[in-house]
Structure formats: C-alpha cells, structure tokens
Amino acid sequence: MRLLRVGDPGSEFPVVLDESGHSRDLRPVTSGISGDFLADGGVSRVRDALAGGDLPALDIAGMRIGAPVSRPGALVCIGLNYSDHAAETRAEPPAEPVVFMKATNTIVGPNDTVLVPKMSVATDYEVELAVVLGATARYLDSPQDAAEVIAGYAISDDVSERDFQLNRGGQWTKGKSCETFNPLGPWLVTADEVGDPQALGLRLSVNGQPRQDGNTANMLFGVHHIIWYLSQFMVLEPGDVVNTGTPAGVALGANDFDYLREGDTVEVSIDRLGVQRHRIGQA
C-alpha cells in the first residue's frame, strides 16, 4: 500500500492510494499516520478497510503533500554507505556503518521549498532510501529479524551543507540539521509492496541535469543489517526514520557539479516509491 498525508503544514490528514492509484480518505480509520498508528496494527486496518470498500474516494489534485509520517522521534542517518560515494569524497569505505543524527524538524513534504541557509556556500543534495519503523527495534538478534520491524520505505533527500558539515568543527550534525533539510515522501510504501529493498534504482537531477543514478544493491551495508546494527546501540521506535546513505554524484564529489542555489529545481525518484520535486529558496 501507498500511504500519504495531504494538507497545509500542521493540518495534514491521511490518505491511501488503492490498487488503481485512486485516493481514498483514511480518516474513517485514523486521524494520522504516526508511530502509534503503525505500532497498533494500522496498516492491517487500512488493508481491511480497502478490501471492504469502507474508504470514500477523495480528489487530492492540487493539494500539498506532506511527509508521509508525522514527526518521528528519531531521524537516524548512515554515511558513506555506497563505495562509489566514499570514493568520490576521497573517504575510505567504513568497516562499520557510519551513524549520525539529524534533527527531526528538518522533515518537510516532498515538494516543499528547501531553503539554502544563511552563510551557506555549499548546500548539497543526497537521494536516499528511507526506512520507516513499524515496531520497536531493540537488541535484534540478527539482520534477518529486521524485516519484522520495518513498516515501509520512502524517498528521502538528505540535504547537506558541506562547509558547515566539514569545516566548522565538531560533528556532521550542524551541516545536516538546517531547516527544510529532509524532504520525505511522497508516500510511505509498505514493505510488502516494495519487495527487495536491495533492488531499487535511485536517481536525482538538478534543473533537469542528471546528477545521481545508483542502485541500493550497491550499499556497503544493506537495509536489514543497518536496522539490526542500530538496534545494538539505540532503541528505534515505531515511526522513526532511518536514511540509508547515498550513491555517487553529489556536488561534494569529484565532479564539476554546482552546489544548490535559489531558483534550482531538484527532482528525486526511487523505483516504486514515487517522485519528489522541490524548489530551492533562500533563508
């Protein structure tokens, strides 16, 4: 299933797309798509309501699409998880996943404006597969157990200010947590519909120019390994989001790509997960 939230910021309401791609109002089932909803069998209730014809049709044409899950408790990110991205940034492929946190208030809708921060000289983009937790992950016994705690997947653009990240001292967080720096969605696609998370093409373009073209098959650490690994160090809760890294093609890399600036348009897509299109503005 494909779940989404539509409406003005702070007033989004839940919608599901049926098998024909038509929008159905989810408010008869739930007031929102949140960690509590996912943990309490929400996906199963939606599936039953769809099968029973209990959800009214809804025209959402022209409506804003918000992030598909309301603000998570944690937004955890994995760095340098594609060998080609590590190579283009002149970094050694890590022996273990590189983990950093990103402020959850960076999450915006997939087509919302992304703001270049004040003093920024190097605002960059990163197409990433986002994992949305549907159950608690705590000391999982093996990577195989991770499948049981994953609700689904979404597109994430892990926007990054490289000068803040690399040249201003300290950790990566200050270059990752500026406002609007994590467009998410358009959909939360349930794990059963996505299938193998290690067989998804990822693409990103700026102003129509292709920049990134990768595949999750090339992750150094696969999705299930990442969720298992994180559960050894922290408790992941329903609704939490994990960004799993980006392939080559970022502006920081060994290429001639420009950093983002006001007026640019970024288009991001992942197989079976939809498309984002966001304009770049100036803070």
Image (cartoon, rainbow, N blue to C red):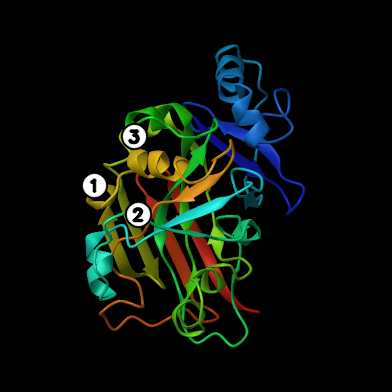
Give x and y (percent) for residue 60.
Answer: 64, 42
Kind of residue indicated by mark 3: Pro
Residue 84 against residue 23 in the figure, above or below:
below
Comparing labels 2 and 1, the label whose residue is closer to the camera? 2
Give x and y (percent) for residue 6.
Answer: 66, 45
Comparing labels 1 and 3, the label whose residue is closer to the camera? 3
Q: Which residue is mark 2?
A: 97
Mark 2 and mark 1: Cα distance apart in space: 16 Å
Q: Is residue 256 left or right of residue 229?
A: left
User: In the image, what residue occupies the spot 55% across and 52% down?
Assistant: 75
User: In the image, what residue occupies the spot 41% across and 64% down?
Assistant: 126
Residue 181 against residue 276 in the figure, above or below:
below
The label on residue 236 is: none
Q: Is residue 218 left or right of residue 142?
A: left
Q: Quadrant of residue 203?
A: bottom left
Looking at this rendering, what residue extends furthest in the right direction? 11
Q: Earlier in the sequence, mark 1 or mark 3?
A: 3
Give x and y (percent) for residue 225.
Answer: 33, 41
Element marked by disc 1: helix
Q: Quadrant of residue 27?
A: top right
Mark 2: give few (<14), some (14-19) or many (20+) Cα within 10 Å.
many
Kind of residue indicated by mark 1: Ala
Mark 1 and mark 3: Cα distance apart in space: 16 Å
The label on residue 217 is: 1
Looking at this rendering, what residue extends furthest in the top direction? 52
Residue 106 against residue 190 in the figure, above or below:
below
Q: Is residue 48 left or right of residue 246?
A: right
Q: Which residue is mark 3?
A: 143
Q: Is residue 56 left or right of residue 218?
A: right
Determine contact: label 1, label 3, CB under 8 Å: no
Along the line of sight, which residue is nearer the eye, 97 or 149? 97
